[in-house]
Amino acid sequence: MKNIKLIEVPSEIGAGTRGASLGIDAIKIAALDFMSNFFVHFPSEKLEVENKLLYEPIQSPYAKRMQGVLTMYDRISKAVADSINAHFFPVILSGDHSNAAGTIAGIKMAKPKSKLGVIWIDAHADLHTPYTTPSGNIHGMPMAATIGEDNMEMKVHDLDEKTIKQWEQFKSIGKINPKVLPEDVVFISLRDFEKEEKYLIEKHGMKVITTSEVRRNGAENVCRKVLRYLSDCSDIYISFDVDSLDSSISKGTGTPVSNGLREREVEDLISKFMQNRKICCFEITEVNPTLDKENLMAEIAFNILQRSVNVLMMN
């Protein structure tokens, strides 16, 4: 039975649409509406954030609010590493997906010799860099930073020295770079990415499992296939972006995309993964109640969270 610790990271400075910082409270409200005492059960830590930067001028158009993101990464990585070292299983409730790179850094800081696998359940690859980004939003970059990629081959922008220095810091949080090998990443329900990201997926032969494959083969078979693919990894981190769900149900997120997973498919998938002892950390991200109706996205996220943690506790 695992000792679970909740780490709340209501930071949204990496996102392009405002409101993801409210996602954690929306999930807690969903729990109350379901008359669940889930959030009373577990120790939790709420990290200080840098959301005040949303009111300040942007320094770099290709890595917006990067200094604040670096500050967050120090906090997130330390909180995750401390939790793992204290024999907790960290469950991260996060604002925007840029925070995931800090989580991964924390796992590697606690387990520097670990061969870490990543299951990235997301409509987007998040493989942009400041050299290729169409938006400058850092929530589109955590996976590139994690595998230590600049993607100079597809370079679009010339960066100033400060941005280059910050990007190098970003990749090297925890003094480990790369933190994950590209072949140890599995994308699930990936369906919205630019040619620069496609280039990296093909360059590294990164594993992609489509929505239709999940639907055709079922959660159990997909889970078995993914874990077999990551069998060389000693630890596995799961990152669940709610925009992996179909846009018909994922209205309460900043970047909804059609042809996504159904709620039950995600629930079944993550629950199956949670039965494996290599899973060392779980993150749920990008719930934005300001874009939602009747808190539906947060309710779905809470159902998935609760079932996943229940399975975790039984194993």
Image (cartoon, helix red, strand yellow):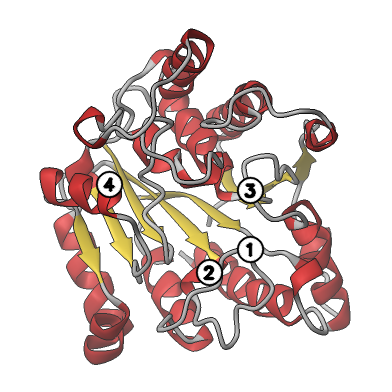
Viewer-side label of 4, 2: 4
- Against 315, residue 259 (above or below) is below
Q: Position of residue 187 (x, y in %)?
A: 31, 60
Q: Position of residue 310 (x, y in %)?
A: 58, 70
Viewer-side label of 3, 4: 4
Would residue 278 appear left or right of 39 to someone viewing this image? left
Q: Which mark is residue 15?
A: 3
Q: Position of residue 140 (x, y in %)?
A: 47, 46
Q: Which mark is residue 243?
A: 2
Q: Which residue is mark 4?
A: 196
**Amino acid marked by disc 4:** Glu
Instruction: Please say if the residues under marks 3 and 4 sit with CB atoms less than 8 Å apart.
Output: no
Instruction: Please say if the residues under marks 3 and 1 sit with CB atoms less than 8 Å apart.
Output: yes
Viewer-side label of 3, 2: 3
**Amino acid marked by disc 3:** Ala
Viewer-side label of 1, 2: 1
The mark that comes first in sequence, 4 or 2, is 4
Q: Residues within 10 Å of mark 1 (few under 14, many from 20)?
A: many
The mark that comes first in sequence, 1 or 4, is 4
Would residue 153 appear left or right of 266 to someone viewing this image? left
The mark that comes first in sequence, 3 or 1, is 3
Q: Which mark is residue 254?
A: 1
The quadrant holding residue 78 is top right
The quadrant of the rendering that contains the C terminus is: bottom left
Q: Position of residue 177 (x, y in %)?
A: 32, 21
Disc 3/disc 1 C-alpha distance (Å)? 8 Å
Q: Residues within 10 Å of mark 2 (few under 14, many from 20)?
A: many
Q: Residues within 10 Å of mark 4 (few under 14, many from 20)?
A: many
Would residue 212 appear left or right of 11 to someone viewing this image? left
